[in-house]
Image (cartoon, rainbow, N blue to C red):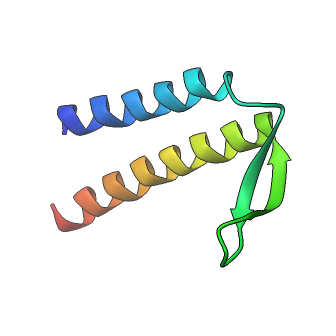
Amino acid sequence: MVPFLALVACAALFVWLTGRALPNVVASHFGAAGLANGFMPRDAYVVVMLAIVALFLFLTVKRCRYFG
């Protein structure tokens, strides 16, 4: 479990550190042709990505406790 927690911590740190290098507005949705058609502020993107990392951690811990 410790290597997994270290991996999640690295993922969160990666999102936090690289998020500062993004432009103020980032593409958040892409159409079928691969062109960006949805945008969001950089800070919102970083928050969403950190929330996804936290959700992944939460679901994995819950699964480990449920299945033993």
Q: Position of residue 16 (x, y in %)?
A: 58, 26
Q: Quadrant of the C terminus?
A: bottom left
Number of dots carrying numbers: 0
Question: Residue, x 24% and y 39% (percent of image)?
Answer: 4
User: Does 13 sit above or below residue 38?
Assistant: above
Q: Quadrant of the N terminus?
A: top left
Q: Position of residue 52 (x, y in %)?
A: 55, 51
User: Hey, which residue is sitting farthest left in the picture?
Assistant: 68
23 vs 44, nearest the viewer = 23
18 relative position to 28: left or right: left
11 relative position to 24: left or right: left
User: Does 55 sit above or below residue 10?
Assistant: below
Question: Residue, x 43% and y 53% (percent of image)?
Answer: 56
Q: Position of residue 31 (x, y in %)?
A: 71, 73
Q: Position of residue 22 (x, y in %)?
A: 70, 30
41 vs 62, nearest the viewer = 41
User: Does 65 sit above or below residue 22?
Assistant: below
Question: Residue, x 30% and y 34% (percent of image)?
Answer: 7
